[in-house]
Image: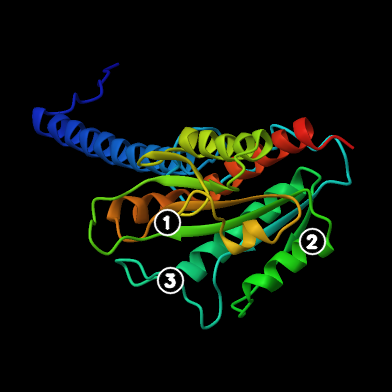
Amino acid sequence: MSTTGKKRPTVKQLQVVVRRLWIACICLFVICASLLAVVIKNRSNIKLFGPDKKSSNTVEDVPAVTADSSDYVVCLDPGHGGRFTGTQGLDGTYEKDDTLKIALEVKKALENRGVKVVMTRTDDSDIELDERAAIANDANADLFLSLHRNYTAGDKSAKGFEVWIHSTNSDTSRAIASAILEGLDKVGISEDRGVKVGTQGDSEHNYAVIRDTNMTSVIAELGFMSNQEDLDLFNEHHEEYAIAIAEAVVDWLNTYCKK
């Protein structure tokens, strides 16, 4: 009885098999690399709020501090509005739009922390200075916070954030102004220009909205629209700035306005 064995594959056949296995490995590597790239991209889009700078237009607002009383009232005043455009930035944007944008974010952050908020405007409306003060006074607000942006025609290198307070330079006014600047600085600003007293022309006088309000009142100048660095910082971080402002305000309310 005779037996026959299986034929061994030829060298050429082995080469074909190896080539096919090699191609399959390459395809598998490409697929895995593509999937890994998608995962990394998706993970980089997760937002966790903190003092670090962010890289997108949204941020998770997790309150680090909440109001001790549900009776706190803050009046937010987005500067300018309507035909009063305020200054115009190098990028063509108007101050009135920037101030409303960040004021609405501050409102949301304050309410998220248990603070009642009154707005002098919620849209592109003309509001006179005396009307703004009257709104705050009628609401018996604990704090009046007017939000503005700065500008200089002569020196485009001028930059930074500053807060104006009443000429009396009271401890309560200076405390909230300093707290706001410290919070903004943690997010990231071009320069801390400090707390300013009175008006730019006279430290003994006051801007109308500070002069005519019955409560602690400050004006926050959130960067120069005539400076490209400040424009970029505001556009990239205005939501984080809003949360930093809200945190500073709530801390101040809990310290100076206990109810």
Q: Rate crowding at label 3 as few (under 14), some (14 to 19) or many (20 or more) other CA atoms within 10 Å.
A: some
Q: Residue at x 62, y 43 (%)?
A: 168
* Amino acid of disc 3: Tyr
Q: Is residue 95 left or right of residue 74?
A: left
Residue 192, compared with residue 211, is above or below; it is above
Q: Residue at x 35, y 66 (%)?
A: 89
- Comparing 208 with 147, the one in front is 208
Instruction: Provide residue 70's location: percent of width, then percent of height.
Output: 88, 44
Q: Residue at x 34, y 72 (%)?
A: 92
Quadrant of the rendering where the C terminus is positioned: top right
Mark toward the start of the polypeptide (2 vs 1)? 2
Q: Tell me the CA gap for discs 3 and 1.
A: 24 Å
Q: Is residue 148 left or right of residue 251?
A: left
Instruction: Provide residue 207's location: percent of width, then percent of height.
Output: 56, 60
- The answer, for residue 256, to whether it is visible in the render is yes
* Amino acid of disc 1: Gly
- The answer, for residue 58, to whether it is visible in the render is no
List the single residue furthest toward the front: 204
Q: Tell me the CA gap for discs 2 and 1.
A: 26 Å
Mark toward the start of the polypeptide (2 vs 3)? 3
Q: Tell me the CA gap for discs 2 and 3.
A: 28 Å
Q: Which mark is residue 201?
A: 1
Q: Which mark is residue 137?
A: 2
Query: Would you name the residue on which mark 3 appears?
Result: 94
- Comparing 214 with 100, the one in front is 214
* Amino acid of disc 2: Asn
